[in-house]
Each structure stands twice: as structure tokens, then as C-alpha cells.
Image: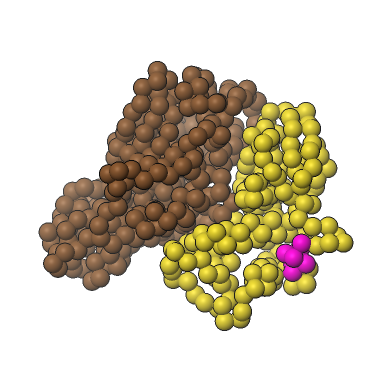
Amino acid sequence: MKTFTYTKAQSPEAAVAEAGEGVRFIAGGTNLLDLMKLQVMTPDKLVDISRLDLGRIEQREDGGLTIGALVPNSDLAADRRVIDGYPVLSRALLAGASGQLRNKASTGGNLLQRTRCYYFYDTATACNKREPGSGCAAIGGFNRIHAILGASDKCIATHPSDMAVAMRALDATVVTLKGDGDRRRISIHDFYRLPGDTPEIENVLEPGELITHVELPGPPQGEQLYRKVRDRASYAFALVSVAGVVKVEDGKIASAALAFGGLAHLPWRDFEMEAMLVGQAPSTALFEAAADKLLAGARGHGSNDFKIPLARRTLIACLRDLTGV
Amino acid sequence: MHFTINGQAYDADLDIRTSLLDLCREHLGLTGSKKGCDHGQCGACTMLVNGRRINSCLTLAVMHQDDEIVTIEGLGTPENLHPMQDAFVRHDGYQCGYCTPGQICSAVGMLDEVKKGWPSHVSGDLTSAALSDEEISERMSGNICRCSAYPNIVDAISEVAGLTPAEREVAGA
């Protein structure tokens, strides 16, 4: 590990004041220290935010929840308000990592997890995300876990988080504090970036901008589900995952929110596909048409070609479960 | 830097990069906790920090100066074993023993999570945390045993949890 200087922030304002070039915030540290040991990430300075007062989950008057950025994944998953109102979020969190990691990993840090692309982790290989301009060894290499949607010729990495997939289905908002003291509220739908020509830039946070909270709107109506398909039954990243919130009323789909993990550089959501479902009577034919729409632009890279039929079948199975067809 | 480990106060002069695991093993002579992968994948380094199980390899010692840290040395002694240690011995919950301190610390932390009502991935009902063999396997998946002593590990943990044979067989989802 490359050495660094360390300071412990006493307030969010003090934390962002310490930020700048080569500075990283550390909370749980479970992903950052993993990457620092391999020198994939080499910050000059760590600002410890782990003891800031951002560890609470609060009910807002509008019925929604405000989740402090430092709430550990395990506490969020087990919170009774989350279990009752947002079971898709509890299920997504519980499907991720291990008990030990969930006890340490924070809500804000989970949103900022880096990809588990083998080549991003291997400093002996080319990776535009790790070393911009060096190329992409995953294209033409081993790419079983890689993206089939929204990738570029610079990067085919996927976002690894389960939690973020549920947050996307739940229309979460990321609340931040910037170095100049301004606060921002960023819709989760605008938070992540596709890789394009700059895969090293994964979200819209400015340098030194600190996530302080994540807000959820009031609990959605309808059935909720998180299904994760992976190579082993526990403690593995998703090949394909679906976070679904679907309401059926009078025999027709009244609303549908479907977000996908394992398919793209960000938790994927296709609003046009959801619009196709709304107002229709649930049926296998409808679900197949929705899967066609979702995957119309899908492209495999060899070892991950299987993800296209897998995503199709997983979506159809989830929609059946959500609608009772 | 100052630390409280197994109820004892320690001072150490550390490189800022030192993990909590390396602090214990390399600086304080507490070598019960083991280093397997050093990346949070195997669980051999599991300790209890403020009562919660974590991977001590994936956290910096400097961040834990205000915490109550418990390692396998703090759970029991050879003369006075912790019930989980005793159960692992009687059920032969190991072969080489390298993962065992992490398994035991993790199991103690896990049973506390169940007591708090925390659900797991295999819980059919998120509002109940009834333990079973399936639940134990899921909740202990962050601890790898390359000797594959898993059946005996589950036996040991289920005994400490007080599960009946019928309770052990309940499937979650």
C-alpha cells in the first residue's frame, strides 16, 4: 500500500474542507482499503468520516425516509421501517456481501463501490478505468461478469452494488455537501454515468463532494422483490439481478419500477419498457415483449453472451412473481 | 495510538497503513486472529468491534482507537473456554484450525445479530429471525473453511443456539 496522510473529520463541513486532489473520504473502508492494498487506488490523504453524525435513519413528515450516509448496510437491512415499507431494499442488502462486510460497509460507500472487473483489479493489465488511455483488457479477454447494456469500446465493466439497484427502483435521491458548503440533491437516475470515453468518471459527484444522506420517497404501493442470480448461493456478486416494484389494480398493471444489476456500468432502468407494461393486463406475452424491449440493444462480448437470455428469463420470472401470473 | 483490546489497554507506535489485524498480530502478540486472504473474502481475521463482527484486515487500526475490540483471546481461555469454543472442540468443527478463530468470533457475533432480530437472505419472513441450519450456513458465508468442516461447524453453532433437530431442518424461503 502506498502511504498517505490521515485526518479524522469532526464535522461534514470540516471533511469537505479537507478534500481536494488525491484526497479520499473513508467510512467503512471495505472497498477502498481492498483497492489501496493492490495499489489500484492510491490516495495521498484519507479523511476519516466514520465518526460523523450521519448514522441515523429518520422518518420524514412526507412519509419518506432519510438515511444517513454512515448507516451500515446491516442496520439498514434490519430497520423495521425499511422492512415494512421497502422490503426490496432489505432484500437487496441481504443478498450482498457477508455479515462481516455488511456490518462495516456504509450506505454512501456502497453507492460508490468500484467495479469487480478482473482487469480493473490487476495492475499488470490494461484498464481505461484504472489508467485512462491504457485500453480495455476485458474486451476480447475474460468477460463473464461484464456488461451487455450501455457499454463502450473503452469499458465494459459493471456496477457491483445490490443496494444501488434497489435504490434505483425506489427513486432515491442522493444528498451531498460540496466543498463550497453548498448542498445538492441528485436523483439516483442522474447520479451514475455510462462509461463512454471516460470510464474513470463513474458518477456526477464533484471532487471533494461528500454524500451525507440518501432519501427515499414514501413507500411505494404494490409488490416488491429482489432477485439475484449468481454463481454460488451466497457471498457472490450478481450476474443478473432485478429489483422490482409492481402494482396490479383491477387486473391491469398500474405502475412498474424495474432496475437491473450486473448488466451495465450503472444500475440499469428502462422507463420506456416500464411504460409498455403500465395499463396492460399481465401476461407472459407482455413480459416477453418487455424483455425484448429491455434487451433490444444488448451486446455480449463472448464469455458474457449468456447474460442476454439469463436477463430475459430473470425479468420474465420476476414479473410473473410480482403480478401473480 | 491507544487501543482497548479484550479489556486491556495497549499503546502502539504504528505506520498509518497498519490494519487492525496487523496491529494485533504483529505489534501486540495477539496471534489468534488469522490472516488468510487479507481482502475480506475468507473471514479468518474476524473480530468483534463494539460487539459487531467485522473483517479486521479491511480496516485501519488508527480508526479504532475509541472502540472495544474483542479477539479470540478475549472470548475464552484454555482453562475456561467460551461456550462456542467448547462446542467447536466437541463437534470437531475444524481440521487444520486456521479458520477457527474467525469462525468462532463470527458465530458469536452472528448469534447476537439473530438475538437482535436481524433477517438474512434466506429468511422467508424479514420480520422474524428464526435460526436453522440453512440460516446458519447463509449467515456464516463470510467464513471460508478450506478443510470443509462445515457440517460440524453448523452442528457446533446450532448447539450453542439451542436449536432442536426440528428447528434445524426448517427451510427459510
Task: Give how far across and how far down residue B132 sits, in percent.
Answer: 56, 72
Q: Nearer the viewer, residue A283 or A251?
A: A251
Please report the bounds of the magenta region as a residue range. B82-88
Q: Is residue A47 above or below residue A157?
A: above
Task: Give how far across and how far down residue A303 sits, in percent.
Answer: 42, 53
Task: Give how far across and how far down residue A224 sits, in percent.
Answer: 31, 60
Q: Residue at x 29, y 47 (%)?
A: A63
Q: Which chain is yellow?
A: B
| Residue A207 horizontal side relative to residue B103, left or right | left
| Residue B14 horizontal side relative to residue A9, left or right | right
Q: Residue at x 55, y 59 (%)?
A: B116
- The mark tally for this picture is 0
- Asked if one can make out residue B154 in the rendered structure from this viewpoint, the answer is no
Task: State how the image is colored.
Answer: by chain
Q: Which chain is brown?
A: A
| Residue B36 horizontal side relative to residue A197, left or right | right
Majority secondary structure in the magenta region:
helix
Task: Give how far across and how far down residue A136 sits, in percent.
Answer: 44, 36
- Asked if one can make out residue B20 in the rendered structure from this viewpoint, the answer is yes
Q: Is residue A100 above or below residue A209?
A: below
Pick the quarter of the image with the N terminus of chain A.
Answer: top right
Q: Residue at x 81, y 39 (%)?
A: B28
